[in-house]
């Protein structure tokens, strides 16, 4: 709706002060209606230049790299029990000689919920996304029930 009315304005027939008045009017209206994207459009329409948003550009570049990595690597994924975020482990390199030797206690980066992760065997190199590694529990010392007890201790600490 705004675009239709705004595009009808002949900016080349207006002086700078008039343009700024119109932009301020549309900006205030957009703020009242909570239309975030209008500021960028106003800038483009008035000056024929786009606002460069460094954070947005970084986010898009990061999403692109992440999408490419997801295509290239096997991913182990579990869902955070609290916020439902996917806690992902990217398998960079496998070696079938490596046994499953530990349980990981991990923390969701979005809600800080702790959970237990068993990556399984054969993982030589990996990276993780959306979680932090809190503690590694050797399977020589911890079976699953002891690992779950340790998880509860950390949750209650």
Image (cartoon, grey):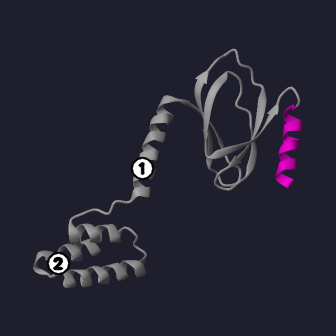
Q: Residue furthest left?
A: 13
Where disc 1 sits, the SS reads helix
Q: Which residue is mark 2?
A: 9
Q: Residue at x 66, y 55 (%)?
A: 83
- Which residue: 83% across, 45% down? 151
Task: Answer with the quarter of the image where residue 55 lies.
Answer: bottom left
The vertical placement of 56 against 65, above or below, is below
Which residue is labeled 1 in the image? Answer: 60
Decide whether residue 43 is among the magenta residues: no
Residue 143 included in the magenta stretch of the image:
yes
Q: Is residue 1 visible?
A: no
User: Residue 30's spot in the image, x, y percent?
Assistant: 37, 77
Residue 2 seen anywhere in this rendered image of the structure? yes
Q: Name the dominant secondary structure of the magenta segment.
A: helix
Which quarter shows the C terminus?
bottom right
Residue beneath the point at 29% across and 68% down: 41
Relative to 135, 46 lies left or right: left
Q: Position of residue 58 (x, y in %)?
A: 43, 51
């Amino acid at each position: 709706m705004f675009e239709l009315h705004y595009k009808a304005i002949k900016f080349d027939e207006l002086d700078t002060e008039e343009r700024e008045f119109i932009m301020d009017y549309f900006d205030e209206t957009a703020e009242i209606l909570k239309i975030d994207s209008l500021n960028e459009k106003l800038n483009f329409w008035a000056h024929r230049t786009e606002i460069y948003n460094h954070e947005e550009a970084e986010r898009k570049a990061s999403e692109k790299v992440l999408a490419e990595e997801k295509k290239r690597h096997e991913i182990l994924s579990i869902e955070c029990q609290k916020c439902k975020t996917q806690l992902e482990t990217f398998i960079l390199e496998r070696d079938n000689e490596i046994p499953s030797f530990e349980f990981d206690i991990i923390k969701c980066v979005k809600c800080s919920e702790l959970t237990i992760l068993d990556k399984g065997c054969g993982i030589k190199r990996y990276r993780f996304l959306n979680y932090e590694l809190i503690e590694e529990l050797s399977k020589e010392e911890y079976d699953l029930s002891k690992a779950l007890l340790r998880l509860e201790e950390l949750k209650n600490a």
